[in-house]
Amino acid sequence: MRAWTAQWLLGQLGAELGGRDGVDLEFSLRLTQGRVDAEGRFCCWLAGGAPLAFAPMARVLERLEAPEPVRAAQSEAVLPVRQGLAVAFTDGVPELRLYLHGRDPATLADNYGAWRWRPGGEARRSRYFFHYLPETPSGLHPSALVHDALRPAFERLLQDERLQQGSGFWLREGSDGAVEQVDLAFPWCPNAGTLEGLLELASVLGVPAREDSRWHELPIRHVAVRVGEGPPQVTLYASASLEGEWPGSEAELQSRVRQGALVFHRDVEESVFQRLPPVSRASPEPIDLDAFYGGDVKTWRAVLGPEMHYHAGLFDMPGLEASDAAMDEALRRAVVELYPFIPAGGRVYDVGCGWGGPLAMWIRGLGCRSLGLTISRTQFRYVAGLGLPVRWGDAEQTLPPGHFDCAILLESLSHIRDKDRLLRVLRVFADRLVMRVNCQDGSPPGSAFGGTMHMVSSGRLRELLEGAGWRIRHWRDRRREALPSVAVWHRRLRSVPVGEDSHLETLRAWCERVMTAPEAWAEHNPLIEVVAD
């Protein structure tokens, strides 16, 4: 009879994954009532760009005689990205886990699933759903799910500034759809002991001080909290890339993960956080942009068109008279003409994504793994309802969640108060910047559009870009081609009754003002298309 030990399992994993590229090692410590469980919990991850790259994981499952549904799920994974095989011992009995990270073929959104089983037993399926803070599209806050005794300390942990700015949480759902676990992500791998909320959680659990050395210095990537029945518990995860030979023991695996995660943390501090300008402490917006950019979806569809593009289209015919069909085509052209500047298949951050029209095109037209950011909860919920990757937040108070090949601001920079800081932040996180910017050359800098836009001249825009370290590769005024868009919005708004939607009424007043002298307005208000590296 096989002896299921941590040493034996580590050897089985090493036989197939050792010496390969794209392997990460992970282990976890569990804080529970009065103690720290520090052994018998580890995972090995394999990354790849095609199904064939995960053949070693299939062989691991064969070695471990995994249940047939588990093997089938692994072999049939759609657009696989990473796969992990983990073990967690309880009273000497192992529970094996297969983690599957793939992408949705239609939206390229990340999908996370898992299977759990004990040797010789049936497998249970679960799914993971990631959400950026502060909440899910349905309005669920993670703290609402945790045990009452842990909630105050958990909420303290949630207040970590970096966590709020650029990360989020997973919800693990069982096969019945019930949430089983909340998992906070700390991608910069801070030492556990530096997180005050985590120290408070340990105190609530009664973890004795003599155990501090086992977890205080651990560079953690995730903090998971049990939800539902059972005693409260908190699990700390650490991970690092495999460097060199396969570890010969669980103790060696833990030691090397600790070392690798610490090196990673120091690298992120130096290459990212030390380069960031201070957080903007500008006075609050006089307008509630969340509410301003909400509104009734049906009404806005009547104004913007069926694909909900809230930006100017580009027309190839002179004159201001344009049909709805011509407007739809001009809106698509305005996006397509940016395609040559955006790396196909790359990672895109759409800052100010609005109702998601262009976001859908980056994904479907270029195969870009894209993430939209909007300050409007209404837009956030609408875009998420389309299945598109999106987060709700203020571009001036959040950080891009990771590295992007390209950041896109399609007529959204004018809504940023501290443009210099945002451009410097994007310089840290993005290789390329693609923008169309509404500029104001005929009047001094100032606010516009009901106080929601903070206008600068095209000359000042150039100064800001170069001052933030961007090298301008392309510069073009597209206002003449875009001007018929105002006429179409103006015409459509005539069929919309005057109401209490301040945004809609601001747009109505703006269109009426522009249409009194459109050519003169266009002359002094360029729409600058700029690409910078």
Image (spheres, rainbow, N blue to C red):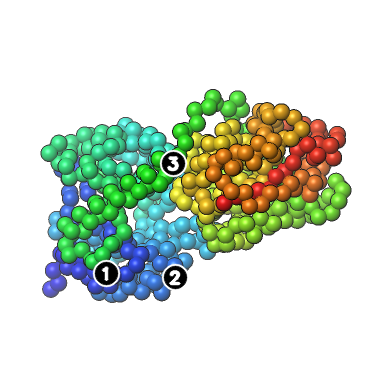
Mark 1 and mark 3: span between their CA atoms?
36 Å
Q: Which amino acid lies under the numbered mark 1 shown in the image of this protein?
A: Gly
Q: Which amino acid lies under the numbered mark 3 shown in the image of this protein?
A: Arg
Compared across the picture, whether 466 is left or right of 39 comes to right
Compared across the picture, whether 368 is left or right of 492 comes to left
Q: Please, what secondary structure does the residue beneath circle 3 have? A: helix
Can you give x and y, in whole percent of width and height, for residue 222 in the image?
32, 48
* Residue found at x 40% / y 47%: 271
Residue 275: numbered disc: 3
Q: Is residue 4 above or below residue 254?
A: below
Q: Please, what secondary structure does the residue beneath circle 2 have? A: loop
Residue 62 seen anywhere in this rendered image of the structure = yes
* Residue found at x 37% / y 47%: 268
Q: Which residue is mark 2?
A: 50
Mark 2 and mark 1: span between their CA atoms?
19 Å
Nearest-to-viewer mark from 2 and 1: 1
Compared across the picture, whether 162 is left or right of 255 comes to right
Q: Is residue 26 above or below residue 227?
A: below
Q: Earlier in the sequence, mark 2 or mark 1?
A: 1
* Residue found at x 39% / y 56%: 127
Q: Earlier in the sequence, mark 1 or mark 3?
A: 1
Q: Which residue is mark 1?
A: 18
Q: Of 224 and 322, which appears nearest the observer?
A: 322
Crowd tier of the residue under label 2, counting other residues whose Cα lies within 10 Å: few below 14, some 14–19, many 20 or above:
few
Nearest-to-viewer mark from 2 and 3: 3
Can you give x and y, in whole percent of width and height, for residue 532 in the image?
60, 50
Q: Which amino acid lies under the numbered mark 2 shown in the image of this protein?
A: Ala
